[in-house]
Image (cartoon, rainbow, N blue to C red):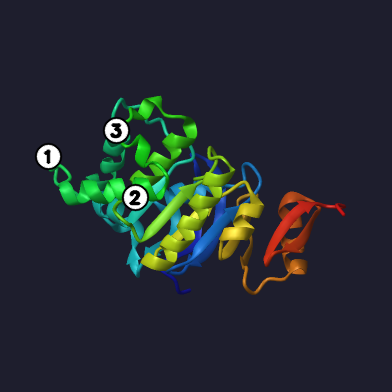
């Protein structure tokens, strides 16, 4: 198996409850890989296991190194992880929240210098949040906070991004802007991106590959540039029940089965 991120026979769970069973896949440099599945299929558990927040069996390498054996600080430098929901409610400016993303590469009492502050501010601007830079983070809307936390995750440009529904609180325009930005980031930086989504159509539009989870097992691994409507319909129906796959403006769309 080759790729920037390689996962082999990963199994994980909570206590005696097994959630994931012997999952193997890889994500190449420059690739956006979307993880799809019904509620409870193990999507969030997989991200936690890969980044070392949850004990797991099997193997996981990043750029050829055993990811789980790396010291926590080094692992934090290599991975940008964004949880599905953040408990961050600090009364700090949005820019200060983004600057926290540099903590893994700074010494204990070191503060970000002017160059790092400018990079953080530029990233906020790219994501449409320059106007909130000095606003209290706790006073922002949920969608605005999500973009700030996303910027915090991205600011040090890690080679691996693990994102759990990064667009869940965003409006239509910001959702598509964020996913397009992710595609461009992956290609520009040569990063590997693994993201969970509940929106199959977002995944079909912006991902390079789909990993389909069903009841804790990997049901399919689809490279979208090689997939056709028939194979997508069969694989997605196994996850979501009867669906139809349509083609529009060069992209596939999923609708409920029986639509016209």
Please name which of the two marks, 1 or 3, marks the residue nearer to the observer. 3
Distance in Å between CA atoms under marks 1 and 3? 22 Å
Q: Is residue 240 above or below residue 93?
A: below
Q: Which residue is mark 3?
A: 134
Q: Tell me what residue is drawn at x 46 percent, y 57 percent.
A: 182
Q: Residue drawn 46% across and 29% down?
A: 141
Q: Is residue 120 left or right of residue 3?
A: left
Q: Residue at x 56, y 46 (%)?
A: 173
Q: Residues within 10 Å of mark 3 (few under 14, many from 20)?
A: few
Q: Quadrant of the C terminus?
A: bottom right
Residues at marks 3 and 2, CA–CA distance in whole angstroms: 14 Å
The alpha-carbon separation of the residues under discs 1 and 2 comes to 24 Å
Looking at the image, which residue sits at the far front? 131
Residue 40, horizontal then vertical, whole percent: 62, 42
Residue 109: numbered disc:
1
Q: Circle 3 — which element? A: loop
The earlier-in-sequence mark between 1 and 2 is: 1
Query: For residue 92, what is the image quadrant?
Result: top left
Q: Position of residue 231 (x, y in %)?
A: 74, 68
Q: Is residue 160 left or right of residue 215?
A: left
Under tag 1, what secondary structure?
loop
- Closest to the camera, between mark 1 and mark 2, is 2
Which residue is more in the foreground, 114 or 82? 114
Name the residue that disc number 2 marks: 123
First-in-chain label (1 vs 3): 1
Disc 3 and disc 2 in contact, CB within 8 angstroms:
no
């Amino acid at each position: 198996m080759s790729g920037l991120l390689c996962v082999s026979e990963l199994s994980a769970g909570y206590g005696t409850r097994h959630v994931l069973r012997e999952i193997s896949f890889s994500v190449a440099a420059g690739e956006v890989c979307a993880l799809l599945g019904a509620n409870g299929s193990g999507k969030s558990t997989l991200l936690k296991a890969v980044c070392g927040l949850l004990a797991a069996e099997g193997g996981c390498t990043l750029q050829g190194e055993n990811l789980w054996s790396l010291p926590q600080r080094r692992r934090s430098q290599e991975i940008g992880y964004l949880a599905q929901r953040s408990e961050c409610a600090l009364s700090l400016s949005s820019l200060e929240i983004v600057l926290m993303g540099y903590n893994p590469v700074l010494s204990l009492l070191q503060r970000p210098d002017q160059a790092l502050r400018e990079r953080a501010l530029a990233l906020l601007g790219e994501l449409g949040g320059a106007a909130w830079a000095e606003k209290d983070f706790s006073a922002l809307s949920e969608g605005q906070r999500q973009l700030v936390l996303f910027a915090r995750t991205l600011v040090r440009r890690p080679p691996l991004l693990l994102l759990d529904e990064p667009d869940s609180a965003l409006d239509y325009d910001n959702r598509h802007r964020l996913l397009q930005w992710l595609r461009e980031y992956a290609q520009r930086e040569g990063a590997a991106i693994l993201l969970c989504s509940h929106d199959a159509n977002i995944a079909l539009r912006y991902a390079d590959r789909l990993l389909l989870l069903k009841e804790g097992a990997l049901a399919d691994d689809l490279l979208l540039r090689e997939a056709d409507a028939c194979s997508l319909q069969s694989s997605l129906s196994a996850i979501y029940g009867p669906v139809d796959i349509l083609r529009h403006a060069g992209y596939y769309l999923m609708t409920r089965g029986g639509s016209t």
